[in-house]
Image (cartoon, rainbow, N blue to C red):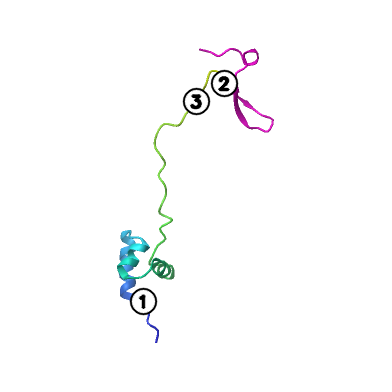
Amino acid sequence: MTITFWTEDKIVKAEKLWKEGLSAREIANLFGSKKNTVINMAHRNRDRFPSRQDTWHPQPKAGPPVQPIRHPDRVTRVTMSGAHVTMPRVPCIDGYAKP
């Protein structure tokens, strides 16, 4: 006879704790088991333990958009490869810096 760790009572209690937001490690500590035991049990009972990754979305940082720093003594040029580089201003080519 095989003794199973996860009885129906423990699964119901773990389901309640899962929905309250406890982590797998916290649930495992309450039951005296390991985190992977809880994760495997939740995987076997997917209908009772919804995935948490679908509900987590990082919040965008609020604030003004960052403006590039403009230096009057430098200009931005595009190289042959398409890269944008910042170079010193050449007065005879670029004209003098505007105050």
The kind of secondary structure element at disc 1 is loop
Residue 88, magenta (yes or no): yes
Disc 2 vs disc 1: Cβ atoms closer than 8 Å? no
Residue 59, x across and y down, in percent? 40, 44
Residue at 63 percent across and 32 percent down: it is 83
* Magenta residues, start to end: 75-99
Residue type marked 2: Arg
- Residue density around tag 2, few if under 14, some if 14–19, many if 20 or more, within 10 Å: some
Q: Is residue 94 above or below residue 21?
A: above
Q: x, y (%) of residue 12?
A: 32, 70
Quadrant position of residue 30:
bottom left
Earlier residue among tags 2 and 1:
1
The disc placed on residue 74 is: 2
For marks 1 and 3, give the CA distance.
Answer: 62 Å
Q: In the rendering, at what x and y percent does residue 97 appear? A: 55, 14
Position of residue 79 in the picture relative to residue 9 (left or right): right
Q: Quadrant of residue 84?
A: top right
The residue drawn where x is 47% and y is 28% is: 67
| Left or right of 80 on screen, residue 76 | left
**Which residue matches tag 1?**
5
Check the image and report above or below for 98 versus 50. Answer: above
Name the secondary structure under disc 3.
Answer: loop
Q: Marks 2/3: CA distance?
A: 11 Å
Q: What residue is disc 3 on?
A: 69
Q: Which mark is residue 43?
A: none
Quarter occupied by residue 31 = bottom left
Taking the view exactly as shown, the residue that stands out farthest to the front is: 88
Disc with the residue nearer the chain's start (1 vs 3): 1
Tell me where residue 92 appears, x and y as whole percent.
65, 13
Residues at discs 2 and 3 in contact (Cβ within 8 Å)? no
